[in-house]
Image (cartoon, rainbow, N blue to C red):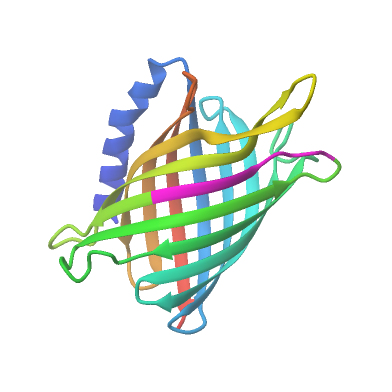
Amino acid sequence: MIRFLKITALVAGILLPLKLSAQNDFGLWTGVDFRYKATKQLDFGFQVQGRFKSNVSQVDQTFLSPYVRYELHDHIRVGLDYRLSNRPESGLFGERNVHRVTMDLEFKNLLKSFADRLDLDTRIRYTHATRPGEELNNDNLRFRLKLSYNLPKTKLTPHIATEFFYHFNDQIIYTPTEVRAVHRFNKFRLRAGLNYPLNKQHELSMFYMVEPEIESFDRDYVLSLGYSFTFGG
């Protein structure tokens, strides 16, 4: 536990100054994840998270997200979750709610047969978001690749990952003869992090992420701190 906190402070101390010298936003994500293992293949869970923006001076959104995941095979897992997000105009809560449904197809443990400590996962994620009373264009297909490694003689498992967002109807172009929708890759994420299991039930996690927009100089920097609790099984 103490070792994990020291590493967290060290990584944050190194990376935070990178944001301060840039003309972009730095954010903080904090959350908890409660997971129930109904069977060896089936998991139910519930996430609560708060996200802060404007150099951690303003609440960006808070959300509640129940989910279910099922392992079809040792290397294949599917998932479904619902997210209720709240984006306040000021303070902690507001009236702007967003509903999002997510479907996942994961290919995991792709290197386990070659290396015990090294692992490679890929994930294809589809998200559809709506806002009551408003027309919200937010349908994405996301592709993630994640490489992790369990350090010998420790519980620490650092990882690196990249994810690309393909946004449907990202731009609507009006011409005298037609209305045309443009689908495109509009942003991607690069992240590095680590997980530290305290025991079989409790785990701490953190990552640092850069999120540039394609065809734009805008980018976000995010530090995420999380805790998960697993029971049942």
Q: Is residue 135 magenta?
A: yes
Q: Residue at x 26, y 37 (%)?
A: 10
Asked which quadrant contains residue 7, the reply is top left
Q: Position of residue 139 (x, y in %)?
A: 64, 45
The residue most toward the right is: 133
Q: Is residue 111 left or right of residue 123?
A: left
Q: On screen, 178 above or below 209?
A: above
Magenta part of the protein: which range? 134-144
Residue 71 in the image: state x and y as whole percent. Answer: 45, 75
Instruction: Decide if residue 171 is in sight here.
Output: yes
Image vertical order of residue 109 relative to residue 182, above or below: below
Q: Point out the residue furthest to the front here.
A: 177
Between residues 225 and 169, which one lies in front from this camera angle? 169
- The residue located at (52%, 54%) in the rendering is 125
User: Where 186 falls versus 103 (above or below)?
Assistant: above
Q: Is residue 216 left or right of residue 93?
A: left
